[in-house]
Image: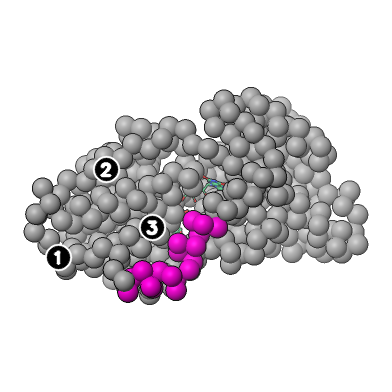
Amino acid sequence: MNNAAPKATDIVLIGGGHAHVHVLVNLALRPLPGMRVTLIARDLAMPYSGMLPGVIAGLYRAGQAHIDLARLATVTGTRLIHAQANGLDRANKRVLLAGLPPVAYDLVSIDVGIEPSLSPVDGAAEHAIAVKPIGSFLTKIDALIARAGVPDGPRRIVAIGGGAGGVELLLSLRTRLIADARAAGRAASELTFTLVTEGDILATHNDRVRAAFRRAFAERGMILLESRRVRAVTADTVVLADGEAIGADAVLATTDAAAPAWFRGTGLDLDAKGFLAVGPTLQSVNDADVFAAGDCAALIESPREKAGVYAVRAGPPLADALHRRARGLRPDAWHPQARHLALISTGERYAIASRGLFKVEGAWLWTLKDWIDRRWMRQYQDTDALARRMAAR
Ligand SMILES: Cc1cc2nc3c(=O)[nH]c(=O)nc-3n(C[C@H](O)[C@H](O)[C@H](O)COP(=O)(O)OP(=O)(O)OC[C@H]3O[C@@H](n4cnc5c(N)ncnc54)[C@H](O)[C@@H]3O)c2cc1C
């Protein structure tokens, strides 16, 4: 059934996330008569999650880890609206924007990531730095790194949350702050790094991976408090559920993520945590013209952890699904792998690979990760090459 007549289709993408950058390029390379693609983006630079710890550690410049969405939109002929979406008027098929008139759509796709969820910990919203969403995180971490450079700046750094993001982040920050302290002639020994987590660190990984990271923390003199719950954060302490108070000059919270609140007003079906419920075709379970991917979506039939790797992998099936729907065809189902190879760095040019019961580590794995990440980024950063592909299509 490839002969369905193309119809004029306004495809509106909300959020320039990890899946949507692929959609922009893919749809531009196979345009349909009457198809127009619009990107509504709150931020014009998309930070690539896989390289963020490397930026913090000082292994990459920030520009190497960001995709310039304005440039990508120009090269792909995408209409770009620099705005924040705050609702869907599905009856009239319009995206509602903060401070701007609504934008009409035939098909809409949502890839807006997540919001921080600091409310379960008293005082966290006031005193902790939320690691998510990643868009604003680098600015906050840069400010922390700058503050750490002054004589009475933060020295006792505490991270809450022992997932891969929190572990890698604290290791990377340690590398950076110690390098900065040494470069400035200050004693690195006055810096302390503590990670507090409710259960085990890296709970979704195997025992050998956990053991390797526990060893990495111990070798670096970092403090790891597992199976300890944080009750509150104050201006200078992290208070645990058992009453122990840990001195803290800076607190990073990588705890649970919440769904954007505006989803609740859309009338779209949501999962128990408020994320957009989608089927295997990445279409909303109650509106076939609404698609979602990445952290903001919940794959109802095959739930996956919220990780950049799944957002990246959703790009090709999402682009196909939109293209087929625009042609009046039924989108194909996508069944993401249950397991993926995670390459988690130790904050230096060294990484530990984890997949199921498999674990291997070494500097060569960081080199492999670096190669994979750079190759992925080139597709969206090398706009000259993309322009040539566009011209040859
Ligand atoms: C420090 C850190 C390290 C991490 N490391 C890894 C890793 O190594 N591997 C891994 O797999 N995962 C990692 N993650 C997780 C990863 O960052 C997320 O899973 C990933 O970013 C999800 O991609 P996404 O496309 O769903 O959303 P995002 O990348 O968050 O993109 C969403 C985009 O939508 C835009 N947006 C949001 N709301 C609106 C709106 N209302 N209107 C318009 N635009 C909007 C935002 O500006 C943003 O650009 C890490 C996370 C952190 C914090």
Query: Could you tell me the amino acid type at mark 1?
Result: Ala
Marker disc for residue 95: none
Please name whichever residue, 246 or 363, is drawn nearer the observer in this view of the structure. Answer: 363
SS class, disc 1: loop
Where does residue 321 sit, x and y in percent of width and height?
25, 50
Residue found at x 64% / y 24%: 207
Give the residues in magenta: 374-391
Left or right of 164? Residue 319 is: left
SS class, disc 3: helix
Magenta run includes residue 205: no
Above/below status of 76 relative to 295 = below
Marker disc for residue 8: 1
Q: Does residue 82 appear in this view?
A: no
Other-residue count near label 1 (Cα within 10 Å), few / some / many at <14 / 14–19 / ≥20: some
Please name whichever residue, 127 or 353, is drawn nearer the observer in this view of the structure. Answer: 353
Q: Nearer the viewer, mark 1 or mark 3?
A: 3
Residue for badge 3: 22
Residue for badge 2: 281
The C terminus appears in which quarter of the rendering? Answer: bottom left
- Is most of the magenta stretch helix, strand or loop? helix
- Give the Cα separation between the discs numbered 1 and 3: 22 Å
Residue found at x 43% / y 32%: 338
Please name whichever residue, 360 or 113, is drawn nearer the observer in this view of the structure. Answer: 360
- Give the Cα separation between the discs numbered 2 and 1: 21 Å
Residue found at x 49% / y 47%: 308
Where does residue 60 sit, x and y in percent of width and height?
65, 61
Query: Could you tell me the amino acid type at mark 2?
Result: Thr
Closer to the N terminus: mark 2 or mark 3?
3
Please name whichever residue, 174 or 265, is drawn nearer the observer in this view of the structure. Answer: 174
